[in-house]
Every structure is written in C-alpha cells, then in structure tokens.
Image (cartoon, helix red, strand yellow):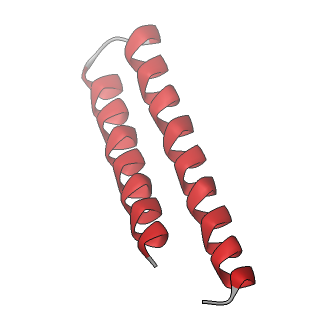
Amino acid sequence: MDPKVKSKINRIAAEADAIARELEDIAQGLGREFKGIGSVKAASGLSKSADKYRYVSSQLRRI
C-alpha cells in the first residue's frame, strides 16, 4: 500500500479513537452529574457510539 494512503488511514483511525474517548468521557460525566432514566439512556447511547468508533478504528488499522 502507498505509504501516504496508509498514513492517512492511520490518522483517521487515531481520530476515531479520540472521538471514542471523548464520547466515553461525556458518558461518564453524564452518569456522575445527572440522575434519572434520561441520563442513563443518554450515557448508554454515547457509550454504544464510542464502541462503534472503536470498531471502525480497529477495522481501519487492519487495512
């Protein structure tokens, strides 16, 4: 694979990891700062989104 393409893929994967970390941080903050069913559902949704970003990142790194 062309090194420029591989480098770009790695940058995209790293950005996906960063987004996943940020979503997890937000989800944890919701859990600490807010109480109730709405905050639990919102935090759960953010965690699921973070998992999807991690999956995309891992798939990109396999290319």
Residue 40's spot in the image, x, y percent? 29, 25
Residue at 59% in and 45% down = 18
The quadrant where residue 47 appears: top left
Q: Quadrant of the N terminus?
A: bottom right
Q: Is residue 61 left or right of residue 18?
A: left
Residue 29's spot in the image, x, y percent? 48, 18
Residue 8's spot in the image, x, y percent? 69, 74
Q: Is residue 46 left or right of residue 36?
A: right
Residue at 35% in and 24% down = 39
Residue at 36% in and 31% down = 43
The quadrant where residue 41 appears: top left
Q: Outermost residue, bottom direction?
A: 1
Q: Outermost residue, right direction?
A: 4
Q: In the rendered view, would you say 33 is above or below 62?
A: above
Observer-nearest residue: 35 or 20? 20
Observer-nearest residue: 1 or 59? 1
Q: In the rendered view, would you say 58 is above or below 35?
A: below
Observer-nearest residue: 22 or 32? 22
Residue at 60% in and 55% down = 14
Q: Outermost residue, left direction?
A: 37
How many callouts does the rendering have? Answer: 0
The quadrant where residue 34 appears: top left
Q: In the rendered view, would you say 27 is above or below 63?
A: above
